[in-house]
Image (spheres, rainbow, N blue to C red):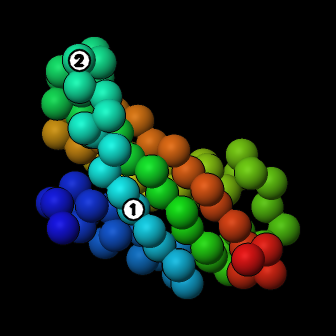
C-alpha cells in the first residue's frame, strides 16, 4: 500500500467507512500537469453511515474535508469519489 493511500485510510476513519476502496490511477495520467507536479490520481469508493440523508455534493465535501492535508504535490492531485450510504449498496 502506498503512503498516500495509507494516509487517506487513516484520515477517513472519522467517517466510519463500512467499505473503503482506494485505487491509485496515477499511471493513467503520466504527462498530465498534476502528475508532473507530483500529485497522484486516485479512484475511491466509500460507504458510510455518515452519508445517510446527504446529497452527493455534501458527501464529497466530507471526504475532501477529511483529506484536506493531502491535497497537493505530495498527496493527491485528483480524486474520483463514489460515496454511498449503507442502504444504497
Task: Give me the C-alpha separation between circle 2 and circle 1.
Answer: 22 Å
Query: In x, y percent, where is residue 30?
Result: 23, 25
Q: In which quarter of the view is residue 36 placed?
A: top left
Query: In x, y percent, where is residue 88?
Result: 79, 74
Q: Quadrant of the C terminus?
A: bottom right
Could one spot residue 71 in this view of the protein? Answer: no
Residue identified by numbered label 1: 22
Local secondary structure at mark 2: loop
- The residue that appears at 69% across and 67% down in the rendered structure is 84
Tell me which numbered mark, 2 or 1, is placed earlier along the sequence. Answer: 1
Q: Is residue 63 above or below residue 46?
A: above
- The residue that appears at 32% across and 34% down in the rendered structure is 28
Local secondary structure at mark 1: strand
Q: In which quarter of the view is residue 12 placed?
A: bottom left
Q: Quadrant of the N terminus?
A: bottom left
Query: In x, y percent, where is residue 18?
Result: 55, 84
Is 72 left or right of 1, judged from the image as shown? right
Q: Nearer the viewer, residue 13 or 46?
A: 46
Classed neighbour count for the residue bearing mark 2: other residues with Cα under 10 Å, few (<14), some (14–19), many (≥20): few
Could one spot residue 41 in this view of the protein? Answer: yes
Residue identified by numbered label 2: 31
Amino acid at each position: 500500500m502506498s503512503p498516500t493511500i495509507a494516509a487517506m485510510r487513516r484520515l477517513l476513519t472519522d467517517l466510519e467507512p463500512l467499505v473503503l476502496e482506494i485505487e491509485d490511477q496515477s499511471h493513467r495520467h503520466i504527462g498530465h500537469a498534476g502528475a508532473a507536479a507530483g500529485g497522484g490520481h486516485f479512484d475511491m469508493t466509500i460507504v458510510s453511515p455518515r452519508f445517510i440523508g446527504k446529497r452527493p455534493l455534501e458527501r464529497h465535501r466530507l471526504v475532501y474535508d477529511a483529506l484536506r492535508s493531502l491535497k497537493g504535490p505530495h498527496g493527491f492531485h485528483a480524486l474520483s469519489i463514489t460515496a454511498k450510504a449503507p442502504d444504497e449498496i
